[in-house]
Amino acid sequence: MLHGSGANTPKQMLERVMENWSDNSAPIGVFDSGVGGLSILRAIREELPAESLVYVGDSANAPYGDQTSEYIIKRVLSIGLQLTDFGVKAIVVACNTATVVAAESLRSLVHVPIIAMEPAIKPAVHLSRTGIVGVIATTRTLESASVRRLCDRYSLRAKIELQACPGVVEYIEQGNVREKGLEKLLESYVKPLLKSGADTLVLGCTHYALVRQLIAEIVGPDVIVVDSATAIAREVRRRLGDGLLRAGTETPGSEIFFSSAPREEANRIISKLWGRDVCVEPEFLPARGIRNFMI
């Protein structure tokens, strides 16, 4: 069963958020294979301060990059259906692996707008001075058809070097964002890209944005680090505006967090990465009838 968390008293908060929901006041759902999507959630919060947000991190099954396509599709559809049952007005797939494997399947199943991820290769190509762009991501993301299409599309404008980074997500999932072991691991993946002449580095996994400062220290001031968070937040704003779904209030929105990880672990890690205390509820409390999370 999912575990939920909120900024104040979670059950009271849920009741307040769900009371008198309309299309405009309904929350935006954001989910990731784990805690990486918090980087996207933060960007959405900055872009849309009045919106209520529901975050789902499937940390018990992270990283998705190590799972089969069939398993990833099953998890994404399960979470997506729960979020629509919850009453969200849009869903952000804040995970590159989930996007490339299962976003289209989710779009075919639910009626709300789906905003999905794409590694920021296009803006990186435009920013590069040397014409060499490095991309770090999970193996599954880098092997996807969508990344191959992006590489093919921009191959005449830049040389795109792809680097899988096994093990990095696992450090971040434990909240270990400043450990020496993580720094050494990142150095082993990033430095060969710098030696090849890359002057722009794409963070192709939302988890990596949570250690952006560490990565920036490793690559130095002459390398531009690019991720998709701001672009995704702006796309959420555009999609809500196009559908006339923006919150019609100036009141700051709330956040509710859910995780498939054990309660105490989820509480500790999400609180640390989000920057304030998060109280984890033992149950996922839906707006209306809901499926068991573990299908």
Image (cartoon, rainbow, N blue to C red):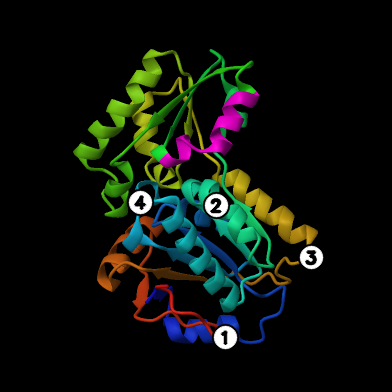
- Residue that badge 4 annotates: 63
Contact check, label 3 and label 2, Cβ < 8 Å? no
Disc 1 versus disc 3: nearer the observer: 1
Residue 292 locus on image (x, y percent): 44, 79
Residue 120 locus on image (x, y percent): 56, 35
Is residue 271 at all visible to an observer of this figure? yes
**Label 4 crowding class (10 Å Cα cut-off): few <14, some 14-19, many 20+?**
many
Q: What residue type is labelled 2?
A: Ala
**Could you tell me which residue is drawn at 58 percent across and 77 percent down?**
85
Between the C-alphas of marks 4 and 2, the distance is 22 Å
Between the C-alphas of marks 3 and 4, the distance is 35 Å
Disc 3 versus disc 4: nearer the observer: 4
Which image quadrant is residue 268 in? bottom left
Is residue 126 at all visible to an observer of this figure? no
**Element class at badge 1:** loop
* Label annotation for residue 244: 3
Q: Which amino acid does label 4 sit on?
A: Pro
Provide the major secondary structure of the magenta segment: helix
**Element class at badge 2:** helix
Between the C-alphas of marks 1 and 4, the distance is 29 Å
Contact check, label 2 and label 1, Cβ < 8 Å? no
Residue range highlighted in magenta: 140-153
Contact check, label 3 and label 4, Cβ < 8 Å? no
Front-most of 107 and 202?
Answer: 107
- Residue that badge 1 annotates: 288
**Element class at badge 4:** loop
Tell me which label, 3 or 2, sits earlier in the chain.
Answer: 2
Tell me if 236 is positioned left or right of 254 in this view. right
**Could you tell me which residue is drawn at 53 percent across and 61 percent down?**
30
Tell me which label, 1 or 3, sits earlier in the chain.
Answer: 3
Q: What residue type is labelled 3?
A: Leu
